[in-house]
Structures are given as C-alpha cells and as structure tokens.
Image (cartoon, rainbow, N blue to C red):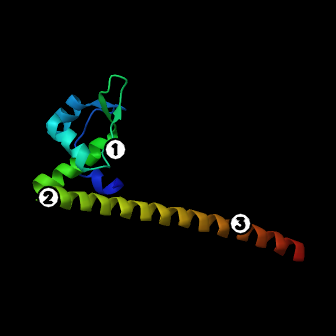
Amino acid sequence: MGDSLKSEQKPFVDKIYHRIGEVSRITGVKPHVLRYWESEFKEIKPLKSRSLQRLYRKKDLELIFHIKRLLYEDGYTIAGARSKIKELAQSDRKQMKIDFDKEKIEAIIHDLKTELKGIRQILE
C-alpha cells in the first residue's frame, strides 16, 4: 500500500509505537471502532505490550487512515474496503517482486559486462 497511502495520511508524531488513545486522537476514529476494524481487517496488527495494551506502528496508522477514507469518504462497505485493501496489498507485493527482479537482472547484466571486458582484454 506504500505510496498510495502517503498522500492520505495526516501528520502524526514520529514515534515507533502509539497506544490506542493516541491513535484515536490522531485518526479521529473511536477506540471501539479501531478494535472492531482489527477484527475485520487482518492487516491491522498492533503489537501487544506485557499489559496487553495495543501498540500501533506507523504502517498501522497509515492503514487506518486508508480504511477510514474508503469507508467514510468513498462509501465502501466493510467487505468492499476489505477487498480493496487485499487488492492493494497484492499489487504492492507484485511491484516488490518486479523491483526485485529488475535489480537481479541489472546485477546479471553488470556481471556479464565485466566478464566481456575481461575477455576482450585477453583477446587484445
């Protein structure tokens, strides 16, 4: 979901973890709704502290902002938003694979060029 979410997110304190109250204030989504969304969207996975408090990361907040937009602004149902989130996640995984493949190919080309230069020097 990477770049597609960056334009939607609101500025928030650059901390590693946020408790549910902070996330609620930052996103404008009530804590009970956040807990409900956790049960509906498996992609929201806050860590739990020893005292079982939810600890949300930046990627969780970005996802919450995205879900909020899908539901409240774009008019998606929970099921529709869930499908859209899965679709975006799959698209991101494909893009990561393409980027990886591109890097792998570039490395192979670099190695071939180096080898060919070595062969040319031997032949001269």
Image location (x, y in percent) of residue 65:
22, 47
Quadrant housing residue 85: bottom left
Q: Nearer the viewer, residue 96 or 8?
A: 96
Identify the residue shown where x is 19% and y is 59%: 79
Report if residue 65 is visible in the image.
yes
Quadrant housing residue 82: bottom left
Residue 77's label in the rendered image is 2
Q: Is residue 52 left or right of residue 113?
A: left
Name the residue type under label 2.
Thr
Residue 79's label in the rendered image is none
Density class for disc 1 (Cα within 10 Å; few <14, some 14-19, many ≥20) is some
Q: Earlier in the sequence, mark 2 or mark 1?
A: 1
Name the residue type under label 3.
Asp
Q: CA distance from mark 3 to mark 1?
A: 37 Å
Q: Nearer the viewer, residue 79 or 68?
A: 79
Residue identified by numbered label 1: 59
**Callouts 2 and 1 close, C-beta under 8 Å:** no
Q: Is residue 101 left or right of residue 74?
A: right
Report if residue 9 is visible in the image.
no
Residue identified by numbered label 3: 111
Q: Nearer the viewer, residue 38 or 30?
A: 38
Q: Is residue 122 left or right of residue 108?
A: right
Q: CA distance from mark 2 to mark 1?
A: 22 Å
Image location (x, y in percent) of residue 57:
34, 37
Identify the residue shown where x is 28% and y is 32%: 13
Identify the secondary structure beneath mark 2: loop
Identify the secondary structure beneath mark 1: helix
Image location (x, y in percent) of residue 27:
18, 39
Q: Earlier in the sequence, mark 3 or mark 1?
A: 1
Frontmost of labels 2 and 3 is 2
